[in-house]
Image: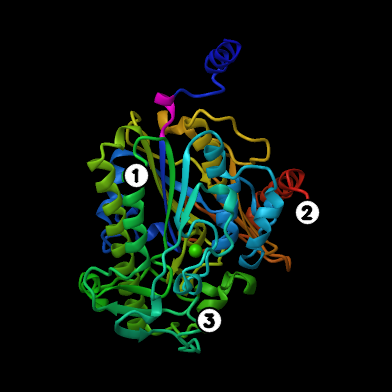
Amino acid sequence: MRFFSALVLLFMTGLVSSAAERPNILFIISDDLSAEALSCYGNKQCQTPHIDSIAKQGMKFTRAYCQFPVCGPSRAALMSGMYPQAVGVTGNGSSENFTKRMGDRPSMSQLFKENGWYSARVSKIYHMRVPGDITKGVDGPDHAGSWSERFNAHAPEWMSKGEHIHLTNEKLRFEKETHYGLGFGGAFYVVKGTDPEGAAQADVIASRKAVELLEAHKEEPFFLAVGLVRPHVPLVAPHQYFNSYPSEEMSLPPKRENDWEDIPKAGISKSSKSSGLEGRIAQQKQVLSAYYASVSFMDDQVGRILNALDRLDLRKKTIVIFTSDHGYHLGEHDFWQKLSLHEESTRIPIIMSVPEKSAGISQSLVQQIDFYPTLAELGGLQIPEHVQGKSFAKLLDDPSQSIHEEVYCLRGKDHLLRTDRWAYLQYKNGTSELYDMHNDPQQFTNLANTPEHQSQFAEMERRLTLKLQTIKAGTLPAN
Ligand SMILES: [Ca+2]
């Protein structure tokens, strides 16, 4: 009786949510996907009808940013709700620190798991080396405490059957028994697969497993996290996807003469220099064609999962999220891939449909670490103290509001601070970039050294210093 009264009290105070209020979470994250490649974010060539369908009935965030433009740290930030330096994962190599640093503090999915949700990982959620951990079919630097169950996709990646094309300059080692250090992690290596279904591919395996889990766990609240590895290289997709994107018809982003002249050396993407794509327009268009083919292939797997959600009548109690771990350059400023602190590499898509909430578009600044408190709030769970993000749940009711004055992204010892109007990039060697995002959204004119912008520059510098102090104050002990 005493237990019953205590439970009633907890319900009344909102500390425990009732079964009816315990929504399912379906969290889908793509790898190395630029928001620029999605049709619902304005791409005129790449078709992504299934991802677009979530945006049609949900909230699309147009100014969402990652915490670090590389897999390991961005995913650690996302799952901990903490800035990368605060959780202690500031490179792919330090992804292993996550478990030790977090200790008893629950990760995002762990919070749900500890409150009675079934929590599963399918394929890549924390860092996994693509293609090495996929060709090997292993966990990678995972966090076991996050999951009730976990499943890896074991797939041939660059060893897939089909037409093979290498579009860039990296030296590759074609050794089937070795899984790391072969050079495939950054190369634009393309396979036009012979199997039209792509049945052996990681994302097909992952979406099938996700459907199986939806069927098996439809009666209980679940937190199902599904990682899709495309369009991360190697760009492997069944051949027919390439037919939709003839390379000669692909349009490259607009370029400016002497664009690199006002970008400090630290701001020039290194992989772009060594890739050999510079000035080779035909190859650049082939990269776009293969990237879009991979995005469409990935989108079809999203469709497979959404179909199951509808077939099982789970939509009305499931929050559906689609996002990416960070952005990606597809030729803007002649930059390719990630690691840059410029707009396309740091901006991410966030699309979220929540039962009984209307569709809309939010232009509020939001960041990856906000997922944790947002989902906790929507699930009726208390947000743990270590979490540094801010819930954007109220934007789902009123997208005209704004929740942040600024968002922040780290790369090594370099920083990006983004406000409504300004993007400030500060490098460890003392050089910097400042862009007026209202008048120059494509970041063509660096204003860091123009006399008339010195007060703005000083203001951004001051804000960044304060931001770094706040982040430091919340840093977890190093153990
Ligand atoms: Ca990635």
- Whether residue 161 is visible here, answered yes or no, is yes
Label disc, if present, on residue 273 of the rendered structure: 3
Q: Amino acid at mark 2?
A: Ala
Instruction: Report which residue position mark 1 lands on.
Output: 216
Label disc, if present, on residue 478 of the rendered structure: 2
Q: As displayed, is residue 391 above or below residue 349?
A: above
| Residue toward you, 301 or 396 | 301
Q: Amino acid at mark 3?
A: Lys
Tell me where residue 43 sits by quadrant. Answer: bottom left
Residues tagged 1 and 3 counted as in contact (Cβ below 8 A): no
Q: Quadrant of the N terminus?
A: top right
Residue at x 41%, y 64% (from the top left corner): 153
Residue at x 59%, y 30% (from the top left corner): 382
| Residue toward you, 431 or 305 | 305
User: Which circle, 3 or 2, is nearer the viewer?
Assistant: 2
Q: Amino acid at mark 1?
A: Ala
Q: Residue furthest front?
A: 1
**Badge 1: residue crowd in 10 Å (few <14, some 14–19, many ≥20):** few
Relative side of 388 to 112, left or right: right
Closer to the chain start, of discs 1 and 2, is 1
Q: Secondary structure at mark 2?
A: loop
